[in-house]
Every structure is written in structure tokens, then in C-alpha cells.
């Protein structure tokens, strides 16, 4: 345990407040997509800040405390990278353009800091009073490891259902409009407040982080239960997540063994938690194991990449229905079938044979697919703003 006093918490709080103020200035630039260079520089800044605070911990409380903080920080940072997989999926499903993604991520991370403070305080309280709590905590870690290793498909389905504008559970609480309105989370329509897709993305990010906190907080308890080290390592691991997303969003899918590595890492910390009192594993050994597993997962992903994604040229060759594509305008600007059913709708597809407009498969009605089954017209095109891809229902390929 460290002997952190009020002054230590004030130094930490001041450092975080100044860093967040800088981040707010960046977030308020609004309407601009962060460049890869600026995102990389900000990521380096946040990582450097986290390591700098680790140096302060070592200077203030000794080398063992510094090593424990570094172990907890690396563990939390590694686990937070898995969030990036879901961020990519969330923004793809809600149609949030890159220029607005940083806003949802900033407020998502900010509220996560408060939520994790509450969860960490509750976890430490329980562990100090009820030793048997380590067993359900270890069980959570084993379940999280299983989810990392085998639950990706189910996890994807849950995220897709939560993000689909027409079927999202968020719509049960507040009406959702189909398109964004600048950087607004809420807008007034017809005398009432309605949510934009940006709010849906934020809410799903928050609920996703709640699930990840149930993994990462018990994991860090296997390293240390010192409140100062647990919370500061969590905060500094989260602070750079927004910038890291823009650095890795294009390459995150290429890290094919990362989830496997994280699953192994969670099994290790679960075993460490269950074995305390029987086997003493030093912070140095824990740090080495975590760094080794994380490093091997990244190197293996680079050395043994999965099959390359099909290129536009590959899809053009694979599709045998290009001659049926016509240069048409949408027959309507809504899905008429959805309107007749009284459903609100957003994602639309246009048949490139006849111009019929229907809702996509995120909809409970799936009228675009129904049109294909009814007409045999094979190719649909997205008519969402900024999207121009085409999908062949027969050959099952994305044409562009």
C-alpha cells in the first residue's frame, strides 16, 4: 500500500484536469477529422504522461510502488485496446463520420472516469471486508477471457442490435432521428427533444465501457488493491484512448491475435488472484508476463496476417451482375413500406435495376432484402450521405 496523502491526490487531479482542458480545446475544433500525425503525437503525449506519473510514484513511494503502477497501467492499457475494436463497429453501425467521432469518444472517456471511480471504490470496499469476493471477481475474469477467446461473434451481434437506429433500445427511452445534426447529441423536432445517432453512439460506448470495466477493474485488483495505484493507472490508461483510436482505427482489424493475447492475459491475472496466499508473484514477474503476452500477440499478428480483404477489383471480377446496374435516381427518399407500418427509419438501399428504395438489414423489416427476394434484382446501393458502395445479393460481394 502507498501512503498517498491529500497532496498526492491533488497533484494527480491537477495533472488530469490540465490534460483534459487541453483535450477539450482539441475536441472543440469540431467538424475536423484528426490527422494521423496529430493523433500519433497526442497518443505519444498521453502515454508519456502516464509513464511520467509512474516516475512520480516511484520517486514518492519507492521502486516497488512504481513497478506496481507500471504493471497496472500496462494491463489496463492493453485491455483498453480491445475497446477500439468495438468503437470501429459502433461508428460503422451508427454512421458517425470521422469528423464527429472524436466528440463521442471524448465524452465517453470523460464519463468513464467517473464511473470507474465509483466501481473501484466499491470493489476495494468489498475486498477489504469480504475476502471471498475474490472468487466471483476471478470468475468474472475467466468469463471475460472466454468472451475474448470465443465470444467475438455474439459480441458483434449485441453491438449491431444496440446501434441499429430503428431497433436500438435507446429508442425506448427517447425518440431517435435518423441523421446527425452537427455536433449535437439532442435536437428539438416538433416541440420535443429527439436523439441524434451521435447520442446513440455515445450511449453504446458508455454501456460497452461498463462491460469492460467489469473485466479490467477485477484484473487490476490482481495486481494491487491500493486505491491510489488502481485509480491513477486506470485514468492514465483511458486518457489517451481517443487519440489511440484515430491512430489504430485503420489497422485494428489486422491485429488478429490481439483478443487471443488479451484472453490469455486475463486467465493469468485470474490465476494470480486465486493463488494469492499460496504463490507470491512479484510485480516484476507480472509486468514481464503481461508485456510478453501483449507483445507476442502483436508480433504474431504482423508475422501471420489473415487473408487480405477483397479489393474493389476483386469484387468487380466476382460480381456477375454488373450489366444490370443502371444509373438511376431513388424512386423515393424514404422506405415506403416502413412509413406504412409507422416505423421510423434511416439506413436506405436503392435497387440499381428499378430504383426501388428499401430499408437495410439493420431494420427489423429488411425491406431491401425483401425487394431482392421478390424481384430477383441483384444489386443494391447505399444512399446514405457519403456512402456509395454497392452490394450484390446473389454473389455476396461488395462491389465498391
Image (cartoon, rainbow, N blue to C red):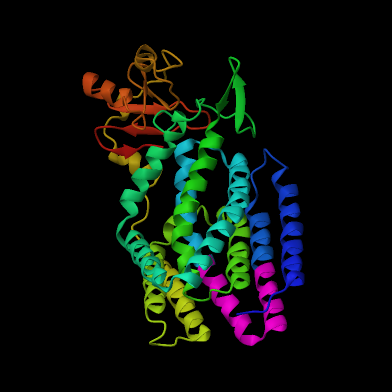
Q: Can you say whether 26 is above or below 58 in the image?
A: above
Above/below status of 63 relative to 305: below
- Residue at image position (32%, 55%) is 151
**Residue 268 at least partly seen:** yes
Looking at the image, is 211 positioned above or below residue 225?
Answer: above
Q: Is 295 situated left or right of 56 in this image?
A: left
Q: Would you say residue 295 sits in the magenta stretch?
A: no
Q: Nearer the viewer, residue 212 or 177?
A: 212
Residue at horizontal 43%, vertical 23%?
345
Horizontal relation, residue 318 to residue 38: left or right:
left
Q: Where does residue 314 sit, x and y in percent of width and height?
A: 34, 45
Q: For residue 351, which quarter of the picture?
A: top left
Occupied quadrant, residue 306: bottom left
Observer able to see residue 303: no
Q: Give the range drawn in magenta.
A: 48-76
Q: What residue lies at 35% left-to-right and 27% top-to-bottom?
A: 380
Apparent side of residue 209 relative to residue 49 in the rendered image (left or right) = left
Q: Measuring from the top left, give residue 379's x and y in whole percent.
A: 32, 28
Q: Quadrant of the C terminus?
A: top left
Query: Camera-side residue: 302 or 274?
Result: 274
Asked whether 232 or 75 is in front, the reply is 232
Q: 266 left or right of 118?
A: left
Picture quarter with the N terminus: bottom right
Give the image location of residue 70, x and y in percent: 59, 76
Q: Is the magenta stretch mostly helix, strand or loop?
A: helix
Q: Residue at x 61, y 16 (%)?
A: 191
Q: Which of 270 and 87 is in front in this view?
A: 270
Residue 251 spot, x, y in % from top left? 48, 57
Label tally: 0
Amino acid at each position: 500500500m502507498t501512503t498517498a496523502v491529500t497532496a498526492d491526490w491533488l497533484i494527480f487531479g491537477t495533472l488530469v484536469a490540465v490534460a483534459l482542458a487541453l483535450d477539450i480545446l482539441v475536441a472543440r475544433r469540431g467538424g475536423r477529422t484528426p490527422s494521423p500525425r496529430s493523433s500519433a503525437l497526442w497518443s505519444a503525449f498521453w502515454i508519456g504522461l502516464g509513464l511520467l506519473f509512474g516516475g512520480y510514484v516511484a520517486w514518492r513511494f519507492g521502486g516497488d510502488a512504481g513497478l506496481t503502477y507500471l504493471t497496472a497501467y500496462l494491463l489496463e492499457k492493453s485491455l483498453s485496446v480491445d475497446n477500439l475494436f468495438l468503437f470501429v463497429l459502433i461508428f460503422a453501425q451508427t454512421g458517425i463520420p470521422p469528423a464527429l467521432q472524436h466528440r463521442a469518444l471524448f465524452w465517453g472517456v470523460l464519463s468513464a472516469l467517473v464511473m470507474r471511480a465509483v466501481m473501484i471504490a466499491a470493489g476495494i470496499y468489498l475486498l477489504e471486508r469480504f475476502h471471498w469476493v475474490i472468487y466471483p471477481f476471478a470468475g468474472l475474469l475467466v468469463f471475460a477471457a472466454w468472451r475474448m477467446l470465443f465470444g467475438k461473434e455474439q459480441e458483434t451481434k449485441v453491438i449491431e442490435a444496440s446501434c441499429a437506429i430503428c431497433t436500438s433500445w435507446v429508442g425506448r427511452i427517447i425518440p431517435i432521428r435518423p441523421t446527425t445534426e452537427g455536433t449535437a447529441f439532442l435536437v428539438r423536432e416538433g416541440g420535443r427533444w429527439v436523439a441524434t445517432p451521435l447520442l446513440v453512439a455515445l450511449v453504446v460506448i458508455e454501456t460497452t465501457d461498463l462491460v469492460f470495466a467489469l473485466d479490467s477493474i477485477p484484473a487490476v485488483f490482481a495486481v494491487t488493491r491500493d486505491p491510489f495505484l488502481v485509480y491513477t493507472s486506470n485514468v492514465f490508461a483511458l486518457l489517451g484512448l481517443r487519440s489511440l483510436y484515430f491512430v489504430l482505427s485503420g489497422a485494428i482489424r489486422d491485429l488478429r491475435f490481439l483478443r487471443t493475447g488479451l484472453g490469455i492475459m486475463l486467465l493469468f491475472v485470474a490465476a494470480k488472484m486465486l493463488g494469492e496466499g499460496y504463490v507470491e508473484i512479484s510485480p516484476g514477474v507480472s509486468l514481464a508476463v503481461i508485456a510478453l503476452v501483449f507483445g507476442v500477440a502483436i508480433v504474431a499478428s504482423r508475422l501471420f496476417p489473415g487473408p487480405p480483404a477483397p479489393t474493389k477489383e476483386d469484387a468487380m471480377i466476382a460480381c456477375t451482375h454488373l450489366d444490370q446496374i443502371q444509373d438511376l435516381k431513388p424512386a423515393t427518399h424514404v422506405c415506403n413500406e416502413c412509413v406504412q407500418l409507422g416505423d421510423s427509419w434511416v439506413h436506405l438501399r436503392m435497387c440499381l435495376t428499378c430504383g426501388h428504395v428499401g430499408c437495410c438489414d439493420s431494420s427489423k423489416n429488411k425491406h431491401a432484402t425483401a425487394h431482392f427476394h421478390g424481384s430477383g434484382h441483384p444489386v443494391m446501393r447505399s444512399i446514405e450521405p457519403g456512402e456509395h458502395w454497392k452490394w450484390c445479393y446473389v454473389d455476396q460481394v461488395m462491389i465498391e
